[in-house]
Amino acid sequence: MQPVSNCNLCESNNVSHYYSDKRRDYWQCSQCDLVFVGAHQHISAAQEKAIYDTHENALEDLGYRHFLSRVSEPLLPRLKPTSNGLDFGCGPGPLLAKMFTEAGHNMAVYDLYYANDMSVFNDAYDFITCTEVIEHLAHPQQILTQLFTLLKSGAPLTIMTKLVIDVDRFANWHYKNDMTHISFFSRKTFKYIAAHYRCELEFIGSDVIILTKPIAPKALSEEIL
């Protein structure tokens, strides 16, 4: 077992062994509570994409639509008409973006492998969705910082990911068995993230997290006027 020196999220060196299975070792940060896999045990980009290519997430899949509705249903009532959104990590079948478009919103999409259009990072957004993506990130804080920079004042970042509960349940957790999953978040981790970015935090059900960017003082004064 090769030890790791720093947390994938907050870069703290206060990390300790959390769990090991036949394929990987998992570490936990005492500062932000992230459970993660060390870089030396990450698979290659080609191996990662080969796994993604096996996923069947068709636009006409009603089961997949129902799954994604766990994000759209709590988010849609919060949005103003014709809001501009970004679905970050949309995959080969950007169904969630289609669902928001059907509801009258304007959607941009980005995915490292399937929609790698860097021009989407030149705009500002009324909301950003990130479903089943953050657990794949080797350096999640870099991506979170980028996404919060793209969000307008008072706008929500909605994340879907399964949450770590405790080591006993982690040992039998199917979620960790996906070799593309390398960062595992808990409620405590998201509380750290919310404090770091000074966001409002809300948990919806078991796997949806809404982080709302604070309203900038200038925007707040304009609202009052």
Image (cartoon, rainbow, N blue to C red):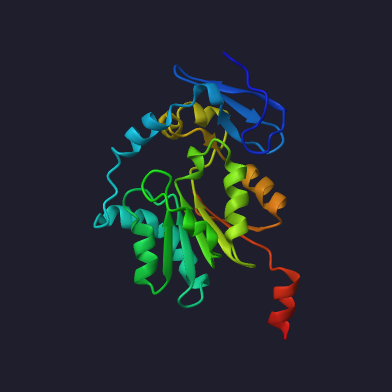
Q: Which quadrant would the C terminus be assigned to in this image? A: bottom right
Q: Residue furthest top?
A: 1
Count of numbered badges drawn on the protein: 0
Question: 60 above or below 16?
Answer: below
Q: Quadrant of residue 203?
A: bottom right
Question: 57 above or below 125?
Answer: above
Q: Residue furthest bottom?
A: 225
Residue shown at 52% from the left, 57% from the top? 121
Question: 125 above or below 48?
Answer: below
Residue 97, image x, y percentages: 38, 61
Q: Quadrant of residue 104?
A: bottom left
User: Closer to the camera, 218 or 19?
Assistant: 218
Q: Which quadrant would the N terminus be assigned to in this image? A: top right
User: Closer to the camera, 196 or 172?
Assistant: 196
Residue shown at 57% from the left, 40% from the top? 185
Residue shown at 53% from the left, 21% from the top? 40
Q: Quadrant of residue 223?
A: bottom right
Residue 129, image x, y percentages: 48, 57
Residue 5 horizontal side relative to residue 23, left or right:
right
Residue 196, image x, y percentages: 71, 49
Residue 147, image x, y percentages: 57, 54
Residue shown at 42% from the left, 72% from the top? 105
Residue 101 horizontal side relative to residue 83, left or right:
left
